[in-house]
Amino acid sequence: MSDRHVVRGMIALPVLAGLGVLLFWGLSGLPPFGNYHGQYGHLINTIALPQRHTTNAVTAVVFDYRGFDTLGEEFILFAAVIGVVMLLREESSEGRSRPDEVTSDQLRLIGALAVGAIFVVGLWLIAFGFVTPGGGFQGGVVIAGAVLLVYLTQGHRPWRRFATEHALDPFEGLGVGTYVAVGLGAAIAGAPFLHNFLGPGKAGTLVSGGSMPFLNWGTAIEVAAANLVLYTEFLQHYLEPLGPKERG
Amino acid sequence: MNFLAYGVAGWICLVGLYGVITSRNLIHLALCLSVMQSSTYILLLSIGYRHGGGAPIFKGVKLGTRSVDPIVQSLTLTDVVVSVTVMGLILALALDVHKEAGSIDPDKLAELSG
Amino acid sequence: MVHVPAALQALVLVLAALLATAVVLSRNTLRQIVVNGMYGLLLVIVFLVLQAPDVALSMLVVSTVAYPLIVLAAISRSRNGKLTDRDREE
């Protein structure tokens, strides 16, 4: 077995060297580092604030100028989580093979305080995504991390009380559905799909960006729910007893 | 310095590919795939960089100051979040294989039949 | 105008290349996930040096919370329920 690996490594190195020569030759055709000449980026930087009243140009690109790409990414997230659920979700078995209680009171207290604080930080990141760095994606993963912290500091039972399948699956569908519904709302109003059809609002405040905050919150809910479903499936899989073939 | 960033991105991609080719464990393979993905993030962000440019956030900053490209940043940030779930799918497949075949070595799987 | 020293950028990028090589060359999967966490943190610094705070925010949580969780759960199941199996090449 081992000499097969050594032979494979020996054959891989010259091939990778050849591929590397091609790759570096291709990369050397790019403009030198720091001399970006693209006009589209420069244009977005100058018109995002006057047109949509958002001071964060990246969020404006993600949810407005390239909103259709974000819809595609959300569907990737949705499909991947469906795949994980199909592979790992099994009938709930009550036999646990691992003791999973948190016995330290200090850990539980500090965990409870930390969960609340991190949850608020996540909400703030989502809400102010149009003003400062942030947005639906960043805040969504922070919120998923905060809910995971409940499992890590409080033990298994409080986690299962609200991270069940019945609670999380609808949220994920709700997130994607909001995004598509806002896009269709624009289409019904006679504009192209995902057109920004509300008034822009005042720059630098929470009310800015037109119909983007709805897309923002839909994305945040979907990202948080999808990540939580992923963590839940892996944690449940970790906790359930081993099958016959897996015992080695 | 002109092409160091692109060279680093290319090197990381090749190193990740070497890890995928010579991997003996499906989980090690998944992590090497994620290393290859991170090389694309570095390449995208270094393409959009401008010397003397700041972040494309304009709160308190006068409109028209030199800033880097926001479009490649939007591509990269959605990709980072989505790659976690795709990696989860790959690991779930590896665990399913382990449940059926009892082994997580890609070479031992080549002898499966039926 | 934001002045980022070119030496800082070069240093951080070279460190990223070295850590990526270390991630691939760690054959023990437990060691690899820890090195991957460090690589993720270094990538956050790379993204900040390249003036991309949004990307840095998302990478921060992903590589320190999400990845270790799912990989450790997978490692534990693949090692037949034991995580402290030393001297095995996987």
Image (cartoon, coloured by chain):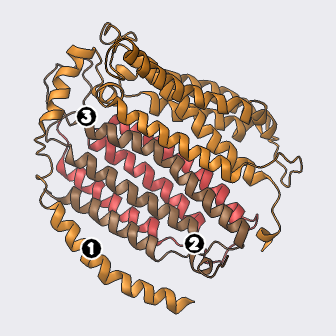
Chain colours: A orange, B brown, C red
Type of amino acid at the residue the image marks with label 2 = Asn
Instruction: Check residue A19 in the rendering and tell me which mark sits there, or answer none.
Output: 1
Viewer-closest of C4 and A19: A19
Furthest residue to the bottom? A3
- Residue drawn at (27%, 63%), measured in percent from left and top? B10
Distance, label 3 to label 2, CA atoms, is 38 Å
Type of amino acid at the residue the image marks with label 3 = Pro
Q: Quadrant of residue A52?
A: top left
**Residue annotated with mark 2:** B25
Q: SS of the residue at dot 3?
A: helix
| Residue A222 image position (x, y, % from top left) | 54, 31
Q: How busy is the neighbourhood of tag 3: few (under 14 within 10 Å), some, or many (20 plus)?
A: many
Residue A106 can be seen, yes or no: no
Residue C33 can be seen, yes or no: yes
Residue A37 vertical position relative to residue A18 in the rendered view, above or below: above
Type of amino acid at the residue the image marks with label 1 = Leu
Say whether disc 3 or disc 2 marks the residue closer to the N-terminus.
Answer: 2
Q: SS of the residue at dot 2?
A: loop
